Amino acid sequence: MDHYGRSAELAHLMQQWCEALQRDTSFRQQLDPVAGTFTKGDLPNYSPACLVLYDFTWRLAGLREENGQLHWNIRADSPVAASARFQMGLRKGTAEMRYKNGAAKLILGGREIGEVAGTVRLITDGTGKPLSVLGVSMSWQEVELRLKNLPHQHIQLKPNQTVSLS
């Protein structure tokens, strides 16, 4: 869905699955799309359901490397982000996000590159240079950016909107 410019809709879908998996940790296979409950006839401990929770958590509130860019998926108000720390090994060092007090501190190669509050995807190059932000919420978001080498900014983003920072 990212490929088709529907990142906010994908994030909404992933959030619904994560909430359902956290309500019922039996990790079953089939989810009722209306009620958001798992079919009790299914056997528990279906490992792909656990992998969905793992992958979706990183895509919602963690970081990913894609085509030489870093995607910092920030959801400071999400329960999954409460005092969370995400760390990922890179070819040269590590990338890390630390959530605290409604914001995410971004660290690359041991040096802080900034802090972001709100629900947004910050895209940087491999050195941490900010390239753009993407609206990944289904509603308008006000995002606060305190990034190295850029002025302190408040940006309003609508769903799926990209704003260039370079």
Image: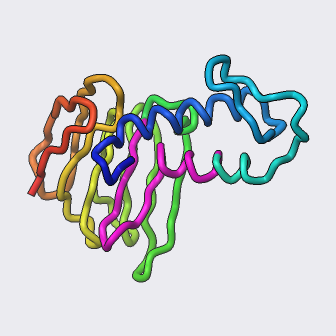
Where residue 43 appears, as percent x and y from the top left, is: 90, 41
Which of the 4 quarters of the picture holds residue 112? bottom left
Asked if residue 100 lies left or right of residue 19, the reply is: left
Name the outermost residue toward the bottom: 91
Residue 85 vertical placement versus 42 (above, below): below
Does 55 lie within the magenta span? Answer: yes
| 8 or 119, nearer to the observer | 8
Left or right placement of residue 107 versus residue 153 in this view = right
Q: In front: 159, or 34?
A: 34
| Residue 24 image point, x, y percent | 78, 29
Would residue 12 appear left or right of 27 to someone viewing this image?
left
**Which residue is at 47% across, 43% downward?**
60
In the rendered image, the vertical position of residue 37 relative to residue 127, given as above or below? above
Q: Quadrant of residue 134?
A: top left
Task: Give the residues drawn in magenta, as a range.
Answer: 53-75
Q: Which residue is pictured at 25% across the width and 33% down the height?
A: 143
Q: Identify the residue at image location x=31%, y=23%.
A: 139
Query: How many tags in the picture?
Result: 0
